[in-house]
């Protein structure tokens, strides 16, 4: 429980939840309640188990400071991306969320926006400066919720084939945490001036993938009503029981524990389990082995599978990516390693795309015909971004639109961030500060000024409009039609936002000839988000 005193904040306020009274802070007209438990600790006997109910308490509990992040490895902290890195301690008592709202118990009936953080399924938290919900709540008169949940081995170790039914859902424990958080929102939204009947889930990168997974889970039905996926790459294919089972076997091996009985895993110190997870990742083929698994029960199919039952067919979807997502990972690379020769470009494209020399050369030449003078490094980043992100984004939009039950809206960011002298172009994560209105926190990355403020108004306005009605149109943007395979309209977010129909079709046609993206073939887990 937070021990911050009254002197540390300007003003306090209280809210009544189903678990007890909370004391939060009020600043700039927005109430914030941080580190609010939506589940019990996940340590010891609760490890790998479905989330247990949150504690209750008498009196008033402080909600003035962020809670624990899930156990995870440290990340590189280049100055440009500090804003996306939570700084709170880690621990297994990590089922906490944060609420930002303009009003308390005022009958506001405001829409609720629940953000799922990025970092694949291995890293991150809901308390980074770049996802502070204050400005979004204030601008849109909405309730914003950010969530921490179990990650990596703590949230996604598949033990369903080990003969102990208690561990049947361990491979999707992190997803069950998010369902528990959404149930908490349903039960407590009104206390924070929110409408439990108008909830939007949204997330970037791994968070976007989490949104897609929730859209496949029958037990999440009715807990949210709209969905936004920002820059997700892994939303079409989840782990199989075979792959996930192999990863768990590697974890047992790394710990020196017989693979038959999962119970001893609950007694391993968290640091030791995390260290063993890192060894298992190296042994079994990568972090993507520890992610949600299609187990035939909680998750019955991959997201957007044309044959899946369609639990979220009635959920409007906003989905998109950034033009050079891959350049984000250049932030933590040695600058001397970034320039590429033509030979290095050829080899890198061959490896990343999973093609032979001839196909790599053809793809490079084809993209170059539409990009005079582009450097080898920039071309590599464009190709990788199209393969890893844009291709899967458009495919998801096509499949969603084909279901015909709810609209889907497609976008792409082409605005160039000034970080590293502009060399990053339009990288991964750049959308986040414009959605949350946090460019000042992200200034080393996005810069600040009239251009940034204008793009924030356009972007934030679209996200709020979509969350409110399922349609992102607002007065600050050109008219935006829903996606269809026939017209293919996409909103391009830049200084001058515009609608493009059949946006960059030659690129998409070329990239679709390559095998599907498989992250662990292309590169190890990146040092970025």
Image: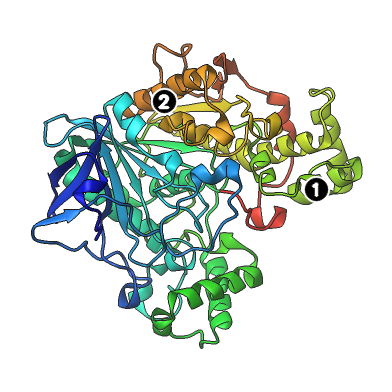
Location of residue 504 in the rendering, given as x and y in whole percent from the top left corner = 68, 24
Q: Residue placed at 64% from the left, 41% from the top?
A: 328
Question: In the orientation shown, which residue stands out farthest toward the left?
Answer: 59
Observer-nearest of 375 and 291: 375
Q: Earlier in the sequence, mark 1 or mark 2?
A: 1
Query: Which picture quadrant has residue 501?
Result: top right
* Horizontal side, residue 480 vs residue 364: left or right: left
Location of residue 423 in the rendering, given as x and y in whole percent from the top left corner = 71, 32
Query: Which picture quadrant has residue 447?
Result: top right
Residue that numbered label 2 is attached to: 460
User: Which of the numbered marks, if any, corresponds to residue 337?
Assistant: 1
Q: Residue placed at 52% from the left, 32% from the top?
A: 431
Q: Residue placed at 39% from the left, 21% from the top?
A: 461
Q: How is the image coloured?
A: rainbow
Query: Can you see residue 62?
Result: yes
Question: In the orientation shown, which residue stands out farthest toward the front?
Answer: 7
User: Which of the numbered marks, if any, corresponds to residue 417?
Assistant: none
Is 70 rendered above or below residue 384? below
Is 410 rendered above or below residue 216? above
**Within 10 angstroms of label 1, few (less than 14), some, or many (20 or more) residues?**
few
Helix, strand or loop at label 2? It is helix
* Horizontal side, residue 470 vs residue 103: left or right: right
Observer-nearest of 336 and 44: 336
Q: Residue placed at 19% from the left, 48% from the top?
A: 6
Image quadrant in which the N terminus is located: bottom left
Query: Can you see residue 401?
Result: no
Mark 1 → mark 2, Cα distance in angstroms = 36 Å
Q: Nearer the viewer, mark 1 or mark 2?
A: 1
Location of residue 127 in the rendering, given as x and y in whole percent from the top left corner = 39, 48
């Amino acid at each position: 429980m937070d021990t911050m005193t009254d002197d540390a904040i300007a003003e306090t306020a209280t809210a009544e939840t189903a678990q007890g009274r909370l004391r939060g802070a009020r600043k700039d007209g927005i109430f914030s309640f941080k580190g609010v438990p939506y589940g019990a600790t996940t340590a010891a006997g609760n490890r790998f188990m479905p989330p247990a109910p949150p504690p209750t308490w008498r009196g008033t509990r402080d909600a003035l400071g962020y809670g624990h992040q899930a156990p995870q490895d440290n990340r590189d902290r280049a100055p440009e991306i500090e804003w996306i890195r939570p700084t709170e301690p880690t621990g297994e008592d990590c089922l906490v969320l944060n609420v930002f709202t303009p009003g308390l118990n005022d009958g506001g009936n405001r829409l609720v926006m629940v953000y799922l953080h990025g970092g694949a399924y291995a890293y991150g938290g809901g308390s980074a400066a770049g996802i502070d919900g204050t400005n979004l709540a204030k601008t849109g008169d909405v309730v914003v919720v950010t969530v921490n949940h179990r990650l990596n081995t703590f949230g996604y170790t598949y033990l369903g084939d080990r003969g102990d039914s208690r561990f049947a859902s361990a491979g999707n424990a992190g997803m069950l945490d998010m369902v528990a958080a959404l149930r908490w929102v349903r039960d407590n939204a009104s206390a924070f001036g929110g409408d439990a009947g108008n909830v939007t889930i949204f997330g970037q990168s791994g968070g976007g993938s989490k949104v897609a997974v929730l859209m496949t889970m029958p037990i999440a039905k009715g807990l949210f009503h709209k969905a936004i996926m920002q820059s997700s790459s892994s939303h079409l294919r989840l782990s199989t029981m075979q792959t996930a089972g192999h990863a768990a076997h590697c974890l047992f091996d790394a710990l020196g524990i017989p693979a038959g009985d999962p119970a001893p895993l609950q007694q391993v110190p968290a640091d030791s389990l995390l260290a063993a997870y890192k060894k298992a990742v190296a042994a079994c083929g990568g972090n993507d082995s520890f992610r949600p698994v299609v187990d035939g029960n909680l998750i019955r199919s991959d997201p957007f599978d044309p044959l899946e039952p369609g639990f979220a067919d009635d959920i409007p979807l906003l989905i998109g990516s950034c033009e050079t997502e891959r350049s984000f990972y250049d932030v933590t690379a040695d600058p001397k390693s970034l320039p590429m020769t033509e030979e290095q470009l050829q080899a890198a494209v061959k490896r990343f795309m999973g093609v032979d020399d001839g196909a790599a050369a053809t793809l490079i030449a084809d993209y170059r015909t539409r990009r005079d003078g582009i450097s080898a490094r920039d071309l590599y980043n464009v190709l990788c971004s199209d393969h890893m992100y844009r291709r899967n984004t458009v495919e998801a939009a096509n499949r969603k639109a084909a279901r015909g039950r709810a609209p889907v809206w497609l976008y792409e960011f082409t605005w160039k961030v000034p970080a590293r002298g502009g060399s990053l172009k339009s990288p991964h994560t750049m959308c986040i500060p414009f959605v949350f209105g946090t460019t000042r926190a992200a200034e080393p990355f996005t810069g600040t000024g009239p251009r940034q403020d204008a793009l924030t108004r356009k972007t934030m306005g679209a996200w709020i409009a979509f969350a409110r009605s399922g349609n992102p149109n607002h007065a600050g943007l050109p008219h935006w039609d829903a996606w269809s395979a026939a017209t293919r309209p996409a909103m391009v977010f830049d200084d001058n936002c515009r609608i493009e129909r059949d946006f960059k079709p030659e690129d998409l046609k070329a990239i679709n000839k390559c095998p599907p993206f498989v992250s662990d073939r292309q590169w190890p887990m990146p040092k970025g988000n």
